[in-house]
Image (cartoon, rainbow, N blue to C red):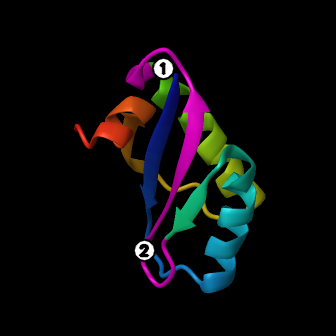
Amino acid sequence: MKWSVSLRAEGDRILLLEEIVALADAVAPMGGVASGIGTTTYGAQMVVDAQSADEAIRLAVPAFEEAAELANLPAWPLMDAEALSEDEELSGDQ
């Protein structure tokens, strides 16, 4: 089953456009998008294949951390991680 996983890391400085563009490039192969320009957080939403929400998050966290490293972003603590199944997304259930 496909899951859309949203993750967000928070730190102590404002992020620049170039940094978030680099993160977007790093998560693009996973069907991902990035956010955080002008804020003290960076985030991504990416698609993973998993059997459950917990498994989706377990798979997405290291991928997110690797993408942040590729984008030369600081290794800030993960503040949020949420998974939404493709079925929930299509039906509007949450």
Residue carrying label 2: 40
Task: Name the side, left or right, on which 51 lies relative to 67.
Answer: left
Q: Is the residue 78 above or below the residue 71 in the image? A: above
The percent coordinates of residue 58 (x first, y second) are 51, 26
The percent coordinates of residue 19 (x first, y second) are 66, 75
Magenta stretch, residue numbers: 36-54
Residue carrying label 1: 55
Q: Is the residue 44 above or below the residue 93 in the image? A: below
Q: Are there few (<14), some (14-19), or many (20+) residues within 10 Å of tag 1?
A: some
Magenta span contains residue 10: no
Comparing labels 2 and 1, the label whose residue is closer to the camera: 1
Residue toward you, 22 or 45: 45
Residue occupying the point 65% across, 49% down: 31
Element assignment for label 1: helix
Q: Amino acid at mark 2?
A: Thr
Q: Quadrant of the C terminus?
A: top left
Magenta span contains residue 41: yes
Earlier in the chain: of badge 2 and badge 1, it is: 2
Residue 66 falls in image quadrant: top right
Residue toward you, 90 or 74: 90
